[in-house]
Image (cartoon, grey):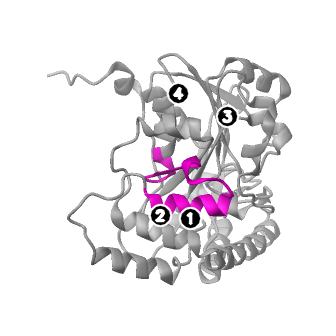
Amino acid sequence: MTIPFRTNVQQMAGYAPGEQPQDTGWVKLNTNENPYPPSPKVVEAIQNAATGRLNVYPDPHASSFRKAAAKLFDVSPDWILPANGSDENLTILMRSFCDDNDVVAYPYPSYVLYETLAQIQRCTVTRLQLNDEFQWEASAAAAVRTSAKVVFVPNPNSPTGNRWSADQLAEIAPDRGILVLDEAYGDFADEPHRGQLLQDQRFAKRMIVTRTLSKSYSLAGLRFGFSIADPELTTGMQKVKDSYNCDTIAIAAATAAIEDQDWMMQNRDRIIASRNRLAGELATMGFNVHPSQTNFLWTTHPTSRHREIYEGLKARKVLVRFMQFDGPHRNIDGLRITIGTDDEIDRFLEATTEVLSQTA
């Protein structure tokens, strides 16, 4: 019997998330999770919510969270759209703005889920190829600006860790479409901002910022994200979201997390300090380390034996992300390494030294 999938779903590969081993003893530096626990206020909020009215549906607008996030980003609550992880925000965006065969563009290499979402929506995908410095060329940016309905830009970028300026973003903001600024790693940037670009007239009613609580707020296991956009855009996107897309416990936890900025910033500063330390250690070991404004490092080794290094580390129960990207002129591969605790970094460095001695 032939399964009657939609043709585009049948043909697509689908997005492959990072490995999530279920047994213990791993040093897990592959999916950019925060190595530190969330605020104690989050745990308290979860406990209080769990003893509340779980027999009724949650607030469909997540009003408490919208108010807290609006205060942080200096906007009114009607700019905020909470979601079940920022990946759901991206899905809502695709469903809201893209028809069959519309052009969806994104820098490449970056977050390939954008391409998967475009394929589900039967859109045409344009990869904005990045050069050796992980920047786009002006001519390619101009073509995207005139053709794309939606342009996704992870800023800072994954896996490369670099961040684009407002002037660079203006080069690719669609003339008749939406620029989505995916700030999953925004809090780790050298100069984190709170949505100032939304007030830039070059992007008026054409920019949507997405944020997640998975990274800087240590809530990857909770699944909560949100978008920030002009109320006219947010109101339209609310039409296509699930009725109760965020549950009662998640709303309570996310509200407590975003209100405890001191806790988040302390963990952020620890991660940045560890990031700088790891970058120096990797350089000493012969790796090429790209400057990062995220909670991970993108690195390559002169031997180019990245898969061997990844496999050697995995055999020692140390997980990093081996990544490959194909391009019209060259293929790119390397290792993306999440910043863990100091103990985890020590174990990673010890294992890497062993692996390199065997692959030399």
**Which badge, 3 or 2, comes first in the chain's sequence?**
2
In this view, which residue lies farthest toward the left?
A: 1
The residue range painted magenta reads 62-88
Kindly indicate whether the residue at mark 1 contacts the one at mark 3 (C-beta within 8 angstroms).
Answer: no
Q: Which mark is residue 64?
A: 2
Task: Answer few, some or many: residues within 10 Å of disc 4's Cα (few below 14, many 20 plus, some between 14 and 19).
Answer: some
Is 250 colored magenta in this rendering? no
Q: Amino acid at mark 4?
A: Phe
Marks 1/4: CA–CA distance: 27 Å
Q: Which residue is mark 4?
A: 97
Magenta-colored stretch includes residue 79:
yes
Say which of marks 1 and 4 sits in front: 1
Residue located beneath label 1 in the image: 68
Vertical placement of 172 versus 225: above or below?
above
Residue 89 image position (x, y, % from top left): 50, 44
Distance from the alpha carbon under mark 2 to that under mark 1: 6 Å
